[in-house]
Amino acid sequence: MTIIAPSILSADFGRLADDVQAVEAAGADWIHVDVMDGHFVPNITIGPLVADAVRKATSLPVDVHLMIESPDMYLEDFVKAGADRITVHQETCPHLHRTLQRIRDLGAFPGVALNPSTPIATLQDVIPYLELVLVMTVNPGFGGQAFIPTSTKKIRAARELLEKEGRGEVPIQVDGGVGPETASRVVGAGADVLVAGSAVFGHPDGAGEGVRALRSSISTSH
Ligand code: DX5
Ligand code: ZN
């Protein structure tokens, strides 16, 4: 079953708890929390305080995506704030093996995200230590960007590498430009977890309808 993880980046921060509860009621599976520091990506968003607010608003897994430099400095704060999953960028972790071990030691599931220009092969030596691969399907930093078409080939390559290394159970997450018009393409290529911000929280009939539309766009094609 494909997992839907709405990204709160596109939520209404004046009523964040309501938006989170609306997507939970509509059948979302995880809540994706996009953390940006204005250095690794050209945007500043939220930190552990908001992850804590999300934690209090839902019983769904809190899936934290760290688009920040030196993520090691903040792992404990995010786990304390209630993060169930912490995904770090390969591009920000010179000691990625140690970072993944530390996330696991803190009690969260470790994931690795790759920017569009970072090859899947860079994951080779940490495959045994990760519990999620996040294939960025836009350049990180903003919601509402266009899906990068070559991403489907990259999703397939990630699926092949995981299978080859005996880690076929590790979910592949995609993030950026995912909506009803791209969902079946990425699921067909091997994606298990769909992050969607604007397609959900920007839906004209409300976030709940955004989740339902995304879910039905997958089921009709599979
Ligand atoms: C982009 C973020 C994505 C973004 C997705 O840097 O990592 O999670 O919120 O937004 P949409 O679904 O609007 O492309
Ligand atoms: Zn994200």
Image (spheres, rainbow, N blue to C red):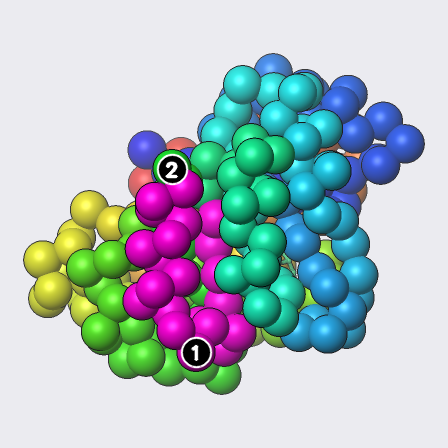
**Is residue 87 a member of the stretch shown in magenta?**
yes
Pointer 2 residue:
107
Q: Total marks drawn?
A: 2
Q: Which residues are magenta?
A: 86-106
Position of 129 compared to 31: left or right?
Answer: left
Marks 2 and 1, how far apart at CA: 22 Å
**Location of residue 75 in the rendering, given as x and y in whole percent from the top left corner:** 53, 51
Crowding near pointer 2: few (<14 within 10 Å), some, many (20+)? some
Q: Which mark, by number, is residue 94? A: 1
- Which of the 4 image quadrants contains residue 40? bottom right
Circle 2 — which element?
loop
Kind of residue sitting beneath label 2: Gly
Q: Nearer the viewer, residue 218 or 158?
A: 158
Q: Please identify the quadrant where the C terminus is shown.
A: top left
In the rendered structure, the answer to whether residue 38 lies left or right of residue 31 reads right
Residue 20 vs 183, above or below: the answer is above
Instruction: Indicate the amino acid at tag 1.
Output: Pro
- Label 1 CA crowd tier, 10 Å (few <14, some 14–19, many 20+): few
Quarter that holds the N terminus:
top left
Residue 90 percent across, percent down from the top left: 44, 72
User: 119 above or below 65?
Assistant: below
Q: Residue at x 71, y 47 (%)?
A: 47
Ligand 1 occupies quarter: bottom right
Numbered disc 1: secondary structure: loop
Q: Quadrant of residue 129?
A: bottom left
Residue 170 picture location, percent across and down? 25, 50
Q: Main secondary structure of the magenta part?
A: helix
